[in-house]
């Protein structure tokens, strides 16, 4: 490793970490394509194993061994700074382990992603989710329960934002995903690829999830709507199926990440 001690928060080599928001990191012009932050040795390990390139690492000395294991053969400067210096730079206390500034990978086209999923496949579509925690949790369930891909709509929170990556435990690097350019027009592309597009909804005409599972579809695209309102009327109008999880005890709905985990498990 190229270990470089840093003693002051004003050191320009730490500019990538300097209180930048996720949005700012995504929009930086150098490197082309922008950056994202990977937080903790486990997350960095999964990012590197997925082929993502680290630009640099910011760590404390106590985590150097973990950084060495996480980086493997990847070549990136490792900046070692005391805890107080790192906190001044980032604007928060770093206690989950090292931070890595990672190059954002290019996303595949939807058609390219759909071509490589198996004949029997399950994918998830996240329509306008606003909470990065929910996005990360859905990815973690998708990885754990064997989904083949995740698609996010144009206005969905970014899976590579720091909180999403952290909540997903780095599984966002394991599950193939990309962003749809147009929605709900993108539903037609899924239907043309022989997916049954099933929206998770409390609306009229929805069948219970276990009834839908019994239909034994070969290709399922589960659509999950945004927190609160759920699926948009435009999306609801073009679904193949409407599916619901029956509720008890006066509870009207589940958190979207919980509902996704149940749907993934029931169709495993």
Image (tube, rainbow, N blue to C red):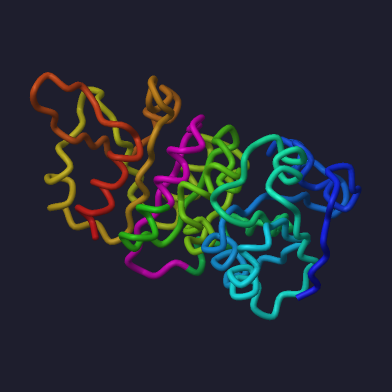
The count of marks equals 0
Comparing 198 with 36, the one in front is 36
**Residue sitting at 69 percent across and 59 percent down?**
105
Q: Could you tell me residue 164's position as x and y percent? A: 52, 44
**Residue sitting at 12 percent across and 45 percent down?**
211
Name of the residue lying farthest toward the left? 249
Name of the residue lying farthest toward the bottom? 73
Q: Could you tell me residue 207's position as x and y percent? A: 16, 36
Comparing 184 with 265, the one in front is 265
Residue 55 vertical position relative to residue 3 in the rendered view, above or below: above
Comparing 242 with 63, the one in front is 63
* Magenta segment: 117-139
Q: Residue 254's image quarter?
A: top left
Quadrant assignment for the N terminus: bottom right
Quadrant assignment for the C terminus: bottom left
Q: Viewed as shown, does residue 109 lie left or right of 11?
A: left
**Residue sitting at 66 percent across and 54 percent down?**
99
Residue 152 vertical position relative to residue 81 in the rendered view, above or below: above
Q: Could you tell me residue 89's position as x and y percent? A: 77, 41
Residue 83 counted in the magenta span: no
**Residue sitting at 63 percent across and 68 percent down?**
67
Residue 127 counted in the magenta span: yes
Comparing 239 with 38, the one in front is 38
Q: Could you tell me residue 229's position as x and y percent? A: 39, 20
Q: Residue 193's image quarter?
A: bottom left
């Amino acid at each position: 490793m190229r270990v470089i001690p840093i003693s002051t928060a004003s050191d320009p080599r730490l500019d990538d970490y300097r209180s930048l928001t996720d949005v700012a990191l995504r929009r930086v012009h150098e490197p082309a394509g922008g950056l994202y932050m990977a937080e903790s040795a486990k997350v960095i390990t999964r990012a590197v194993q997925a082929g993502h390139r680290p630009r640099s690492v910011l760590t404390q000395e106590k985590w150097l061994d973990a950084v060495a294991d996480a980086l493997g053969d990847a070549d990136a400067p490792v900046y070692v700074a005391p805890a107080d210096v790192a906190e001044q730079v980032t604007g928060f206390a770093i206690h989950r382990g090292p931070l890595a500034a990672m190059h954002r990978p290019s996303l595949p086209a939807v058609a390219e992603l759909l071509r490589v999923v198996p004949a029997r496949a399950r994918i998830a579509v996240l329509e306008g989710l606003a909470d990065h925690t929910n996005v990360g949790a859905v990815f973690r369930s998708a990885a754990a329960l064997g989904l083949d891909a995740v698609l996010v709509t144009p206005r969905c929170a970014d899976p590579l934002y720091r909180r999403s990556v952290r909540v997903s435990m780095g599984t966002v690097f394991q599950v193939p995903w990309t962003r749809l350019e147009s929605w709900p027009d993108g539903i037609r592309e899924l239907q043309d690829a022989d997916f049954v597009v099933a929206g998770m909804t409390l609306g009229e005409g929805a069948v219970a999830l276990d009834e839908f599972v019994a239909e034994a579809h070969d290709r399922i695209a589960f659509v999950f709507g945004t927190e609160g309102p759920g699926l948009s009327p435009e999306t609801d109008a073009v679904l193949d199926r409407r599916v619901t999880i029956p509720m008890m005890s006066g509870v009207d709905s589940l958190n979207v990440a919980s509902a996704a985990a149940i749907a993934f498990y029931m169709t495993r």
